[in-house]
Image (spheres, coloured by chain):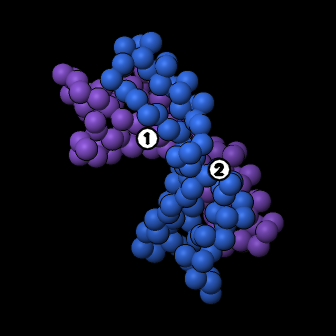
Chain colours: A purple, B blue
């Protein structure tokens, strides 16, 4: 099994209302030194035995289902098979 | 400014219906070799000049606001000040 970690973030150019809301909440409870809060998705998954190339597989899954490529970027890390 | 990356994940013991739904969707479009899909939050934020210790600050923010410590775990990375 190969473990893959995927990080999905909004593009820099895209407004992040959720991030702004969290930033305001943090300021309200005394954490004024915090700025530029950006919130995204973090996925972990396992890939079993397969003939297919892992990188191709992960890119396809990200671009077909896991991300909205119009407004989101993604990066991923493949951990050595365990 | 110091950049901090925070990864919030559901505890292993907690069911992840969202993860299961994504796994089923991936299988429907042909990615049957994928299993154990777990979905969490990924946050990036900047911390400005402060007297306070960064690690203490991040732990406090995570435990007070950014995570539900009953069902979620978190880990974070502090990048050198830029």
Where residue B44 sits in the image (x, y, percent)? Answer: 54, 56
| Quarter holding residue B34 | top left
Q: Residue furthest front?
A: B13
Left/right placement of residue B67 relative to residue A61 reads: right
Q: Secondary structure at mark 1?
A: strand
Where residue B66 sits in the image (x, y, percent)? Answer: 67, 57
Q: Residue furthest bottom?
A: B51
In depth, the one of B3 and A41 nearer the eye is A41
Residue at the spot 40% in from the left edge and 36% down from the top edge: A45
Q: Secondary structure at mark 2?
A: loop
For residue B7, the mark is none
Q: Name the residue tied to disc 1.
A: A44
Residue at the spot 28% in from the left edge and 38% down from the top edge: A2
Left/right placement of residue B49 relative to residue A20 reads: left
Left/right placement of residue B31 relative to residue A22 reads: left
Left/right placement of residue B33 relative to residue B23 reads: left
Q: Tag 2: Cα neighbours inside 10 Å, few (<14), some, or many (≥20)?
A: few
In depth, the one of A42 and B12 nearer the eye is B12
Chain letter of disc 2? B
For residue B71, the mark is 2
Chain letter of disc 1? A
Where residue B46 sits in the image (x, y, percent)? Answer: 56, 65
Q: Tag 1: Cα neighbours inside 10 Å, few (<14), some, or many (≥20)?
A: some
Residue B43 sits above or below residue B31 on the image:
below
Where residue A54 sits in the image (x, y, percent)? Answer: 25, 31
Q: Is residue B41 visible?
A: no
């Amino acid at each position: 099994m190969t473990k893959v970690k995927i990080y999905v973030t909004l593009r820099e150019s895209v407004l992040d209302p959720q991030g702004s809301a969290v930033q305001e909440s943090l300021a309200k409870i005394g954490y004024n030194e915090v700025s530029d809060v950006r919130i995204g998705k973090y996925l972990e998954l396992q890939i079993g035995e397969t003939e297919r190339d892992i990188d191709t597989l992960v890119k396809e899954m990200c671009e077909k289902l896991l991300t909205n490529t119009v407004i989101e970027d993604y990066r991923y890390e493949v951990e050595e098979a365990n």
